[in-house]
Image: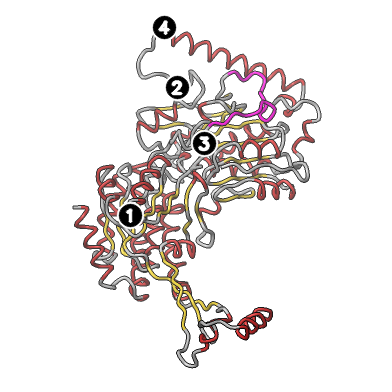
Amino acid sequence: MVNVEFTRLRHAYESGRTRPLAWRRAQLDALRRLVTDNRDAFASAAMADLGKPAAETILMELNLVASEAKFVRNRLGLWAARHPKAMHWMLQPAAGWTIAEPKGVVLIISPWNYSVLLALEPMADALAAGNAICLKPSELSPNTSRLIAELVPQYLDPEAVRVVEGGPKETGELLKCQFNHIFYTGGGHVGKIVMRAAAKHLTPVTLELGGKSPCFVDRTVDINVAARRIAWGKFTNAGQTCVAPDYVLATPDVAEALAERIAVAITEFYGEDPKASPDFGRIINDRHFERLCKLLPVGTVPTEEPSSPLVQVASAVGAAMDMVGRRFNVVAAGRGSAGETAGGGAGSANNAAKPAAGSNTAVGGDGGQRSAAADSDATASAAVEPSEIHKVPGVFDPAGRIVCGGKVDRAARYIAPTVLYGTSPDAPVMKEEIFGPILPILVVEDAESAIRFINKRSRPLAAYVFSRDHEVRLTFERQTSSGALGYSLPLGHLLSSRLPFGGVGDSGIDAYHGKAGFRTFSHVKTVVSKPQFPDTLQLVYPPFNEAKAKLFNIIAKFS
């Protein structure tokens, strides 16, 4: 079946039907109609798969697909046109230019967390480039996958665009085919499998992966604005977003207050009981739910069955220690500032300052929307100097103290939006991409310490900096490496067709959106033209003599 689909696509492409700009524009118009005509159906499918609110599906998926299709359609003529290039003096008179030609038959493997956006948005770019397309939606979002498979042949050219449903078996069969480009969004483990399969045919790949995207906050920000934006970026889609802030590094003078304000923002967004909110989603499946539960503090999640007496005692001790820790913090808060309580000591307000001028911090080398949310091998837990992360007094569990959330419901696959304060870098929640509604907050001395911490870990898909200090911003820009960097704004680059979206290192290879996506799915071909008469190349034909050598030197000086 898979081979039949591939053969049909190959025939369609080789027939030339996908190359005309008129065909491409018609397909892009049809793609827009596909998502606009079926808004309610897509919203219902996303609700069934992920418990995703309809408004979130429309805002964060359907509207973005329609916008991308319109954006690339309106610029297609310019991007596909000849682009003149200057020619070397030895070739004059001559002309040179580049043109973008389609790569051929491309495979798009999409994930479950934004199952419409991350299937159809790269499809828009591939259509604009003039390719035949095979789309493999995620089997983990079956309702959306089924809907896409039903609608695509109704709106798009069925000879040049095919949808193949199924699981790992079908994906494996597709990877055996000799596609001209493979576009994969998901986890690093499967990304390596895709890369190995592509290498057999020397097929170029785009990998949109993920990783632990850090967020730095210092005392210069408006804490209320920062808290609301972090909460929105983190808990949209129940935290199942590749570029969501994965953890927060906050300076001692603002860390605890920030944690409390994020808790307030969560209540503003989802009410006192987020489980009852129509605006908060659910975890995709039981396996992912159980993985997330293990990242919470010990004793937070009750076991499904009665545990052994030893485990019960251990959990009770853990809960008691946490309660003591909370009481300690309350007492400590009455003795000193938030910064002192967090372990900053006297004068810690000055520690949010800029990194030392001329510091030479080495940039280290993770991450995207994922089909397998946690790749433990993708994010190595590096040893961290004790001085870089503050140990918060009274917090005994490595995961930190629960400021809000921590409630779970297995039957509903619900995990409350949870904020952890005083998390240790050695905690399980810091060893893998969370990809869920859990936000750890670590207390870091200053921006320079935060940069060292980030650079010791795999390079993330995104990094966010909440600081109004220009020097701090500039230092993050120059001394950290990430797929994207956002100042006071999580997720912003995900929403714009004008900005490339992609990773670096373990967080991904290549980029798409708008012109970047058109180029990803195109081969940029160089064209050179020179008149046959007069044949000026005879100046460089052998045999070479002293007169020619002198002429070359003279021309080279003025060229």
- Give the crowd class for mark 1: few <14, some 14-19, many >=20 residues within 10 Å: some
Q: Amino acid at mark 4?
A: Pro
- The quadrant in which the C terminus is found is bottom right
Q: Residue at x 57, y 29 (%)?
A: 420
Give the mark nearest the N terminus, 3 or 2.
3
Q: Secondary structure at mark 4?
A: helix
Q: Are marks 3 and 2 in contact (CB under 8 Å)?
A: no
- Mark seen at residue 301: 2
- Give the crowd class for mark 4: few <14, some 14-19, many >=20 residues within 10 Å: few
Q: Circle 4 is placed at which residue position?
A: 309
What separation in Å lies between label 2 and label 1 (alpha carbons)?
47 Å
Q: Amino acid at mark 3?
A: Gly
Is 47 placed above or below 430 here?
below
What separation in Å lies between label 3 and label 2 (alpha carbons)?
22 Å
Q: Are marks 2 and 1 in contact (CB under 8 Å)?
A: no
Q: Secondary structure at mark 2?
A: loop
Give the mark nearest the N terminus, 4 or 3.
3
Magenta part of the chain: 381-396
What separation in Å lies between label 4 and label 2 (alpha carbons)?
16 Å
Residue 30 appears in which quarter of the rendering?
A: bottom left
Q: Circle 3 is placed at which residue position?
A: 271
Q: Circle 1 is placed at which residue position?
A: 201
